[in-house]
Amino acid sequence: MRTREIIAFFALIALILLAKYVLPHPMQFSPTLSLIIIILLSLTFIIIGVLTLQGKFVERRIVFIYVGAALTLPFFMQIELEVPISPEVQSAYDQIESLNPGSKILAAFDYDPPSAPELQPMADAFMKYCFHKGIKVIIMGLWPQGPQQAGQSVEAAFEDDPALRDKIRYGVDYVNLGFQSGNEFVILRMGESFKAMFPADIYGTPYDSIPILRNVKNYSNIDYCMNFSAGKPGTQEWVQGAVDRFGLKLSAGNTAVQAPMIYPYLQAGQLDGLMGGMAGAAEFEKLTGYKDKATTFIKSQSFAHIVVIVFIIIGNMAFLRGKTERKVK
Amino acid sequence: MSWEQTFGIWLAAAFTLGIVSFLYRDNIFYKVCEAIFVGSSAGYWFVTYFWDNLYRKFYLQAFDPVSPHIAPWVGFILGVLMLTRLFGAKIAWLSRWPLAFIIGATAGVYMMFYFVSNAMLQIGASIKPVFVGSFGDIVSNVLIAAGTFCGLVYFFFSKEHKGVFGGAARVGIWFLMVTFGASFGYTVMSRMSLMLGRLDFLFGDWLRLIS
């Protein structure tokens, strides 16, 4: 380890101790301070641009620091960002909104903790909205950790409104059927019998003794389906196995990586609505009125996008400069 | 907060910083964190599949004291046959049977899935009247029609890409590039979201600087 790396290591420790024991908790920047920080960062971009034109290129770690700062600083800034609603998120919301109290919705949680930053906010907003509207939720997962993520959403709804703890009863207003392995084969089999794939819920209660599942044999007894998906098995398999084969009505919340592959299904009408990535989550939070993490995160993401765009411009400036130099030589 | 939770949060924070330290350069902290992550993930999946498949789907059903099922034994035997390739070339050929079953079943299901959902319904959705609806709809319909046609032309290799045909193929490439660009943009978004999740943990759960 070089000397400067040892110094950097101890500087990091000092920063952590400072943040942990000296700085105010929670820490917030006033709008004026936020504006000053933004202006200062913009000025440094100009300096980097000028240096680049002079042939003094910044190293990649500087780019990492800027992206890191763009992601972090908005956590502390008291600024509001307008979140326009896209038609696909509006459509997903409208479908759930049109359900009557007492309707049964199948919620498939097909993701794990790594995808939670994008999908958990939309799942939380969905669960809060359903519980407040009196929609009954049947939870399941084709990913092992999916039902646990659903449990977190239920807990988030109860923490948001403690009155729901008394109002919403497990087994009557919602049920967690747990995880079932088998990917698309589970979806196909559920088209004939839910019970065949989930003979008991996550706690081992037999299917027939759960009140919410009485009269629920297959997809024909479900009013709507919402899928939160981070990959395979996920939305694509639900469209192929349940929508196109059994006529299930479906909307989905996807990670941003997956969303472009799902858009063709939306365009073809195989999918009613789609929430793509953090932007989709922020829009859904706005529509449901349960603004939470996605509304905060989207600010960071927008700032980081600006930083990336600026560095793409700076990178092209460096490229064009190199091209001109080569021509001169 | 209990000391177990506090310890867990500090440990998770240390691992997060260890993984992020790779951005500076490859180092021993990163390697340790990566190895622990890979090992614990492998262990987690082994335990999950053991209890879900071997115990719940096979053992509980095959040895049900009231009504033992026979069907799980078929899967069990196929699974055991898969392992025969570990015991020499003489019996390794038996592993082809479960593989044949898996490939056959998967191909059958996927053929149906993709033919209906990704071929017929997608083609049906692409064939629609162009000049209907608002101006925006018309532009969108024209783009879909032109993009589909030019994209297909690009992948038609029985004729040399020259003249009008070559021009259409070039437009097809542009549509493909825009698609890849959108996909890449979404991927960048997703990666930033992952980082946001960790930053939220570091500044929220760990340092408590955000509420």
Image: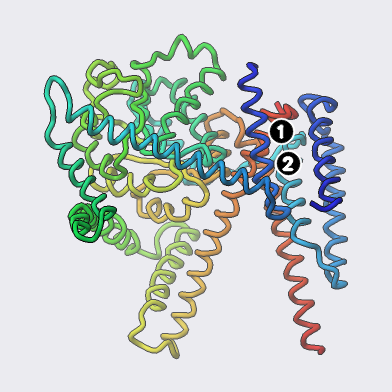
Please rate how many residues cluster around mark 1, counting C-alpha atoms within 10 Å: few if below 14, some from 14 to 19, many from 20: many
Q: Relative to residue B25, is residue A114 drawn left or right?
A: left
Q: Give the residue displayed 84% in from the left and 42% down from the top.
A: A35
The answer to whether marks 1 and 2 mark residues whose Cβ atoms lie closer than 8 Å is yes
Chain ID at mark 2: A
Of the residues shown, which amino acid type is indicated by label 2? Thr
Q: As drawn, is A58 to the left or to the right of A309? A: right
Residue A322 is situated, as x and y percent measured from the top left of the image, at 77, 78
Dot 1 and dot 2 within a common chain: no
Helix, strand or loop at label 2? It is: helix
Disc on res. B203: 1
Whole-percent x, y for residue A25 in the image: 78, 24
| Type of the residue with mark 1 | Phe
The correct choice, above or below, for A148 with respect to A316 in the image is: above
Which residue was labeled with disc 2?
Answer: A72
Name the foreground residue: A114 vs A34: A114
Residue B65 position within the rendered picture, expressed as x and y whole percent measured from the top left: 15, 20
